[in-house]
Image: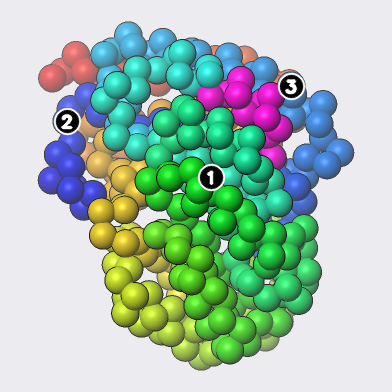
Amino acid sequence: RDRSGHCPKPRDVSVYISIPFCPGKCSYCSFISISAVNARDLLDRYLNGLFDEIKAKALLINKYNLRVKSLYIGGGTPGILDERQLLMLMQLLHDSFDFGKTEEICFELGRPETVSDEKLKILKNFNVHRICINTQTTNDKILNIIGRNHNSQDYFLAVKKALKYGFNSINTDLIAGLPGEDYSSFCRSVDDVINTGVDNITVHTLAIKRAAKLSGCGDNFNPENRVVTDMLDYAYSRLMSDGYVPYYIYRQKNCVSNGENTGFCKPYKICGYNIYMMEDIHSIIACGAGASSKIIKDRKVNRVINVKYPMEYVSEYEKIIKNTDIIDKMLRAELTDE
């Protein structure tokens, strides 16, 4: 059994869908996501290409009789999609894949200000199990410093709305070590998020990459920052005392205090996709800009990575077609040797 409690089977796969657009760029972010405020036309063009790729990857999955064990729509901020775009995406996924044996569908809404009742209804109607509403902190001053377009009340309201729809699980991300946030403020954020009733909380440590606006900002990002170590200690102790259990962990370069990122959840609320992806339990078929497919054979991981930026994705789509052909050959070699 894997750590999610399930028994992997030879033809299990997970599917990842990349929506690399956000309402705005956070100052600590180094992801490829771009602001959708002035890129609405690009977003529509991107979705057209993404829909074509989803159809092509679905044909491969059906061709080789693969079982989609989990589906994860991530970003960026997939909640940036309006109701029309969201409905089109979810309908296409429903029409393209056989979700009869799928154990988990996750949709990372992301920013609280993108959450609406209409979007939540769509996700619930398409049997989405797990959603993510991420605030990073509940300190309004810090939210402003890092360039978020929402405040803490937006987050609390979004979670309150989501809880009404009875999703199997709701996740919130927090970040320890944000610029300007002290120990007391971070601890309040942990308490605030626990008090909302969400059953998944992921505690990240700030990692500054060269592509982020905050890169090279001095002592705030000292890897020996003891305050951030104390923040993590508080979060872990508080979460476990409230019945959350850690179920996955990973590290990144340039983390403040050499910290880590840890996912906590209430019992039986594990996100299986996180385990499958990080521990290479089975192959991942990924669609979208920057998406990385992983074809696993005999414990060896072969990666096929899409072009990085949305503009490149829509203007050089022949590269996506080529990658799909490469994955086809990999799957054929993997499965004909069974």
Q: Is residue 112 above or below residue 130?
A: below
Residue wearing tag 3: 45
Residue wearing tag 1: 108
Q: Amino acid at mark 3?
A: Arg
Q: Nearer the viewer, mark 3 or mark 1?
A: 1
Residue wearing tag 2: 9
Nearer the observer, 169 or 185: 169
- The image's mark for residue 338 is none
Mark sitting earlier along the chain (3/2): 2
Mark sitting earlier along the chain (2/1): 2
Outermost residue on the right side: it is 38
Q: Is residue 232 visible?
A: yes
Residue 80 sits inside the magenta stretch = yes
Q: Secondary structure at mark 1?
A: strand
Q: Amino acid at mark 1?
A: Glu
Residue 163: percent from the left, percent from the top?
A: 49, 51
Say whether residue 249 is left or right of residue 219: left
Quote the CA–CA distance across marks 2 and 1: 26 Å
Query: What residue span does the magenta drawing correspond to?
Result: 78-90
Say whether residue 156 is left or right of residue 107: right
Q: Are marks 3 and 1 in contact (CB under 8 Å)?
A: no
Q: Residues within 10 Å of mark 1 (few under 14, many from 20)?
A: many
Residue 172: percent from the left, percent from the top?
A: 51, 59
Residue 162: percent from the left, percent from the top?
A: 54, 49
Q: Are marks 3 and 2 in contact (CB under 8 Å)?
A: no
Quote the CA–CA distance across marks 3 and 2: 37 Å
Q: Amino acid at mark 2?
A: Lys
> Going 66% across and 43% down the picture, which residue do you hit?
116
Q: Is residue 324 above or below residue 175?
A: above
Q: Magenta stretch mostly in which secondary structure?
A: helix
